[in-house]
Image (spheres, rainbow, N blue to C red):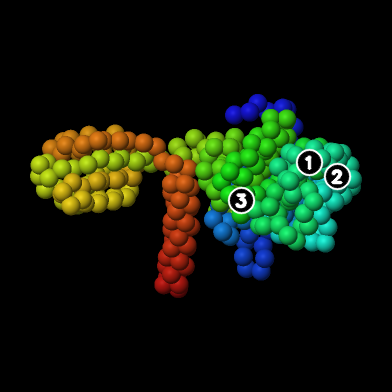
């Protein structure tokens, strides 16, 4: 993890909620970003990621709570040139060349960089003479990034920045973002590419149904899921094994058994107590070959955490329904 450059707050959400009709896009969000952090914002569609970024950038006002950038209102920080943003929404000016658009962004930024430097940093020098309406989707994303870093920002906000980019361009993009973070800037990015969050972010935030349900390093998020993967093979010489036995292991959450024509079965278990499950396998007289026990990847941890949150909400609703039914029955 990169060393923080200070202890001041870059951004702060305090009790923030935002609704659209009957939909709670953001619900009671409390969050602080610090200087020098690279922060990934994860969540399924409808989790509240884009709404949270809109609130952070002053594009929308919260219904309740407060949002601050550098200790003041978001608009003041943006007008001072302290924030650069790359959002999914909003088009680019079509009837201009890339170099002209970047030069304009640099000129109006309170702390603008030299246009040729921005073109090089964004990896789009070769696109400088091309008209914006002649760009591919991935090239447009790179131009949007150039506009976001047209000046000496202290905070860079990116909403799904690598959508449409091929693998090599994505790698080059994140190398540039690492350089931005190493220079002491705070980087906040929302992404659906969990491998990006796993390899790049110092800190991972998981939003689900408008609520912040996990906040920590990638390793801490994986540990929060509280499960590990067990994989092994069972050979025909080991004798018959009922799946019911495997499902009854003390920590088993999910089970997948696949067979090969030679009779060898591959068993994959997701377990909340891998040690107990492995011990139980041997006590049952089984001989698990090629035994592997590994931690969950960030994607599996993400699915586990959001699934648990859904189950908790369902349980709350069921409990509330039973309570109301009991009240009505008592009347």
Report how far apart the C-alphas of labels 2 and 1 lie in the structure: 8 Å
Q: Are marks 2 and 1 in contact (CB under 8 Å)?
A: yes
The residue pinned by badge 3 equals: 165
Q: Earlier in the sequence, mark 3 or mark 1?
A: 1
Determine the residue positioned at 20% across, 47% down: 265
Q: Earlier in the sequence, mark 3 or mark 2?
A: 2
Q: Earlier in the sequence, mark 2 or mark 1?
A: 2
Question: Where residue 246 sits: x, y (%)?
Answer: 22, 47
Q: Residues within 10 Å of mark 2 (few under 14, many from 20)?
A: many
Residue 272 found in image quarter: top left
Residue 175 found in image quarter: top right
Front residue of 130/160: it is: 130
The residue pinned by badge 1 equals: 118
- Badge number at residue 313: none
Residue 53 seen: no
The residue pinned by badge 2 equals: 106
């Amino acid at each position: 993890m990169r060393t923080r450059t200070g202890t001041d707050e870059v951004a702060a959400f305090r009790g923030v909620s935002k609704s659209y009709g009957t939909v709670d896009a953001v619900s009671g969000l409390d969050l602080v970003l610090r200087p020098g952090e690279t922060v990934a914002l994860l969540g399924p569609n409808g989790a509240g990621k884009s709404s949270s970024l809109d609130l952070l950038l002053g594009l929308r006002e919260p219904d309740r709570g407060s949002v601050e950038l550098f200790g003041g209102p978001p608009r003041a920080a943006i007008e001072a040139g302290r924030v650069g943003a790359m959002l999914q929404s909003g088009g680019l000016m079509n009837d201009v060349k890339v170099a002209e658009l970047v030069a304009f962004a640099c000129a109006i930024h309170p702390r603008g960089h030299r246009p040729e430097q921005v073109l090089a940093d964004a990896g789009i020098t070769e696109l400088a003479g091309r008209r914006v309406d002649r760009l591919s989707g991935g090239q447009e994303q790179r131009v949007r990034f150039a506009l976001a870093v047209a000046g000496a920002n202290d905070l860079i906000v990116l909403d799904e920045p690598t959508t449409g980019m091929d693998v090599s361009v994505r790698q080059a993009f994140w190398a540039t973002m690492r350089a931005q973070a190493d220079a002491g800037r705070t980087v906040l990015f929302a992404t659906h590419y969990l491998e990006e969050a796993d390899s790049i972010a110092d800190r991972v935030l998981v939003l689900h149904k408008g609520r912040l349900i996990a906040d920590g390093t990638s390793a801490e998020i994986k540990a929060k899921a509280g499960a590990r993967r067990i994989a092994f093979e069972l050979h025909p010489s080991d004798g018959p094994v009922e799946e019911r036995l495997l499902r009854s292991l003390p920590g088993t959450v999910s089970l997948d058994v696949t067979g090969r024509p030679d009779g060898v079965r591959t068993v994959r278990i997701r377990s909340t107590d891998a040690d107990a499950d492995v011990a139980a396998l041997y006590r049952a007289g089984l001989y698990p070959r090629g035994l592997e026990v590994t931690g969950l990847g960030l994607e599996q941890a993400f699915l586990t955490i959001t699934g648990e949150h859904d189950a908790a909400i369902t349980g709350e609703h069921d409990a509330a329904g039973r309570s109301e039914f009991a009240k009505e029955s008592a009347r």
